[in-house]
Structures are given as C-alpha cells and as structure tokens.
Image: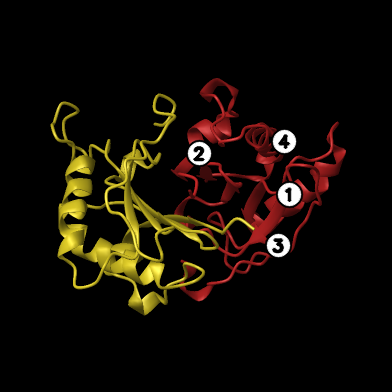
Chain colours: A red, B yellow
C-alpha cells in the first residue's frame, strides 16, 4: 500500500534520445509473493535487469527507466507503468525478471506512438494479459 | 478489454474553475457484473449520477468529469481515475452509484494538492480500499 511510501524515487537509469519524455516506471519495492526480507526484492531485480539490458539493444533507447516506490498494485506485482506527454498511461502487473526483453520491446513500441495506443496485435503478450489499468492523457 | 475501444470519449460534463486541469475520468462502459444488454450501463449511471450531483455542492467544482470508454479495469468496475498536471494519477475500482458523494469529496481533496498525494487519513474509504494502481506524474 502506498500510504507509507508517498514519494517515488526518481533515480533515472537510462538517459535518453528524442523521446526521453516517455518513461517506464518500475516498482522496486514489489515483493511478488516473496519474503519481505528478501534482498534484493523482486521489483528491484526486475528494474536492475532492465537497466542492464537496455544498453544492449540495437538502437538507442526511446524511453527512460525510472524506479518508483509502490505503484499501489501490490497484489499483482511486480509492476511497471508507461507514461508520456499526450499519451494514455498504462500499468502492468504479474511481471517477473523474464519480462525484461518484452518490456523493452513494448515500451519501445509505446514510445513510437503519439497517443500511447499500440495496436493490440503489436503488444507483447505480457501487456495483453498483464494490463491492470489505463488512464487517459492529461489535456 | 480496451483493444476494441481504443479511443476515449472526451465529452466534458462539468466545466471549470481554477483547477480545471484536474480530471475525474469515469468509465461509462463498465458493466460491473450486470448483463451486457443493461441500459444504461452501471458505469454510465455512475457518471450521470456524478454529473447530476456536482452542481449541488457548496463550492464550485475544482475538477471536471470526463467520460471514458474503458479504463482496462473491467474485472473490478465500475472504474474511475483521477489525473492532473504534475500529479500522481490514481485509478479506483469496485465503485457503485452509492460512491458519488465520496468520489466528489475525494476528487476535491485531490484537486487541492499540487502532487496528487492526499494524506491517507483524508482519503475516502472507497479510495483506500478501491485503489487499483497509481502512476507517477510525467516529468
């Protein structure tokens, strides 16, 4: 729950190209059912896996990775969210460390849109099955 | 699911005061377990109840109500989301028509913040129990 964790950390993990305003927020406090004392936590491992994998892509990243403390999706963590100016925001759950490549592919497709609406067939399966909610762009 | 409903309607229901940029998005396609042929749908009834109640408040509204087609929270509808520039966005589920007054109170408190973080004790119970997820502000 977010009542004890009101502030997100904003340590950026992957500096940027033209679409720097697109952000993949990754909850680093997610336990994903593991023991509370597990170090590093499942969410932290997912975040670190993404940060490690991003520079290995063929193209410069079109989004940044930002760690967050709690996306209030604790029952279905690990969790990540995509947002960007003028775009629908999406939050995804049920993520594991095996999702790293699909998350990067999905975030790259999201960054390539102007409104955040990636055609259904172009979304990775983890996005189709793990979508928790979406929020319209601020006007 | 949102694959068949990619676009949100943007019919505004309650024009504005200084904090007009704060928006309460209400899914008007939510069934909330009712039959698909029910007219009006549960989400539409929630939306219309909010629009009807808002002018009866003691103060001018500090947010607007915007109807949306699908917030991808179909399993826990009715659904609504709060967003505004510089603020964390929140999505809530398990809402019914009885939530109208609490939704207006909660949205008013949200609009009074600069970051969207309403102290836990000041949140209506429907916000504490019905939070589906939250997404950091775009930077």
Q: Residues within 10 Å of mark 2 (few under 14, many from 20)?
A: some
Where is B128 relative to A62, above or below?
below
Which residue position holds label 1?
A64
Q: Mark 3 or mark 1, which has the lower sequence index?
A: 3
At x 63% / y 53%, what residue is drawn?
A25
Q: CA distance from mark 1 to mark 4?
A: 15 Å
Which residue position holds label 3?
A40
Residue B42 figure quarter: top left
Provide the chain ID for the residue under circle 2: A
- In-front residue for pair A67/B89: B89
> In the rendered view, does B31 fall on the left or right side of A28?
left
> Which structural element holds mark 1?
strand
Q: CA distance from mark 3 to mark 2?
A: 23 Å
Report the disc number at residue A121: none
Q: Mark 3 or mark 4, which has the lower sequence index?
A: 3
> Which structural element holds mark 3?
loop
Q: CA distance from mark 4 to mark 2?
A: 15 Å
Q: Residues within 10 Å of mark 1 (few under 14, many from 20)?
A: many
At x 58% / y 28%, what residue is drawn?
A123
> Which is more foreground, mark 3 or mark 2?
2
Which residue position holds label 2?
A130
Q: Position of residue B55 (x, y in %)?
A: 18, 61
Which residue position holds label 4?
A101
Residue A69 figure quarter: bottom right
> In the rendered view, does A123 fall on the left or right side of B109?
right
């Amino acid at each position: 729950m977010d009542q004890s964790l009101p502030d997100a950390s904003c340590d950026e993990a992957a500096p940027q190209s033209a679409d720097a305003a697109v952000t993949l927020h990754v909850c680093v406090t997610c336990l994903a059912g593991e023991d509370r004392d597990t170090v590093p936590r499942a969410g932290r491992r997912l975040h670190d896996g993404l940060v490690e994998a991003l520079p290995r892509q063929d193209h410069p990243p079109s989004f940044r990775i930002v760690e967050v403390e709690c996306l209030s999706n604790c029952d279905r963590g690990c969790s990540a969210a995509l947002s960007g100016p003028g775009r629908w925001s999406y939050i995804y759950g049920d993520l594991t460390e095996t999702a790293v490549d699909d998350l990067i592919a999905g975030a790259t497709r999201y960054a390539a849109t102007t409104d955040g609406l990636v055609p259904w067939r172009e979304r990775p399966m983890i996005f189709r099955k793990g979508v928790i909610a979406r929020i319209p762009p601020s006007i």
